[in-house]
Amino acid sequence: MPVRTEVHQLADGHLCVVTLDRPEARNALDTATITELVDTVDDLGHDAGLRGVLFEGAGGTFCAGADVREELADGGRRRTELLTLLYEQVAHLRMPTAAAIEGPAVGGGAELAAACDLRVATVSSMFRFPGASFGVPIGTARTVGQVGLSVAKDWVLSGRDVPASEAEARGFVQRLVADGEALPTAVTWLEQVATHDPATIALLKRLFDDHGGVRDRLAFENDLLRAQAETGSLPSLDNDLPRTVRPRWR
């Protein structure tokens, strides 16, 4: 199976470690993997005893992004729909989330890490937001709030490799650790948060997202991606999006 889960028991409740397990493909996200991730996260969202979720990748790579080798009969429409659903699911989980990043986190992998509350990265890891290289308008919704407008433009428009040290300096990575230490460091943070009242943590997460505008930006970006998947071309803000989400430029 391309996704593994492991439960860590706590004094009150438990944590779940979700592992992307396609090391032969650098944990790239094909449709089957995304489908399993979506089902897994949906189940976790209904787990009353869950106190935290951690995402990691097997084999020294966090995630190489969407699987460009996958043959897509529908042009990628279904896979895009699943990816947007996954981004929303992770962002809206009521319990704290963390990403333990070893190696590259590219494209959809970088987006998955960005969707988490905490990012722990090893010194040899890196990030890349290559949407512009593939004609896909993604990468703005979270980064603009996490690293600021200017840095987000640098990373997303260039699609360059961002070393973990730079990501940590810009605040995207909250913990920079030695190789092999990402998982235990992220687990320690989740265990600390788990000592607090779950309802309060859930409310605080919602307040952070609402105050930061994350929900609205994510919904807008996902509408763009779905419109592109539907039409097969770069979406028009004037013609392809409903009036309720079009930006008021005029």
Image (spheres, helix red, strand yellow):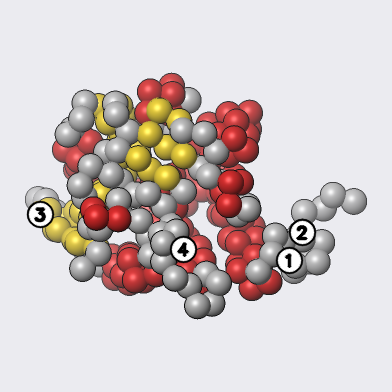
Q: Amino acid at mark 2?
A: Leu
Q: Amino acid at mark 4?
A: Leu
How far apart, in angstroms, are the residues tagged by discs 2 and 4?
Answer: 21 Å
Q: Which residue is mark 4?
A: 83
Q: Which residue is mark 3?
A: 9
Other-residue count near label 1 (Cα within 10 Å), few / some / many at <14 / 14–19 / ≥20? some
As helix, strand or loop, the secondary structure at mark 1 comes to loop
How far apart, in angstroms, are the residues tagged by discs 3 and 4?
Answer: 29 Å
Q: Amino acid at mark 1?
A: Leu
The spot of residue 215 in percent (x, y) is 56, 54
> Are dots 1 and 2 in contact, CB under 8 Å?
yes
Name the side, left or right, on which 105 lies relative to 43.
Answer: right
Which-is-in-front pick, marks 3 and 2?
Answer: 2
The spot of residue 175 in percent (x, y) is 31, 29
Q: Nearer the viewer, residue 25 or 114?
A: 25
How far apart, in angstroms, are the residues tagged by discs 3 and 1?
Answer: 45 Å
Give me the disc on residue 241: 1
Give me the disc on residue 60: none
Q: Which residue is mark 2?
A: 237
Kindly identify the residue that appears in the image at 38 percent across and 34 percent down.
126
As helix, strand or loop, the secondary structure at mark 2 comes to loop
Q: Which of the two discs, 3 and 1, labels the residue nearer the N terminus? A: 3
Q: Residue furthest bottom?
A: 73
Point out the image quarter for the N terminus: bottom left
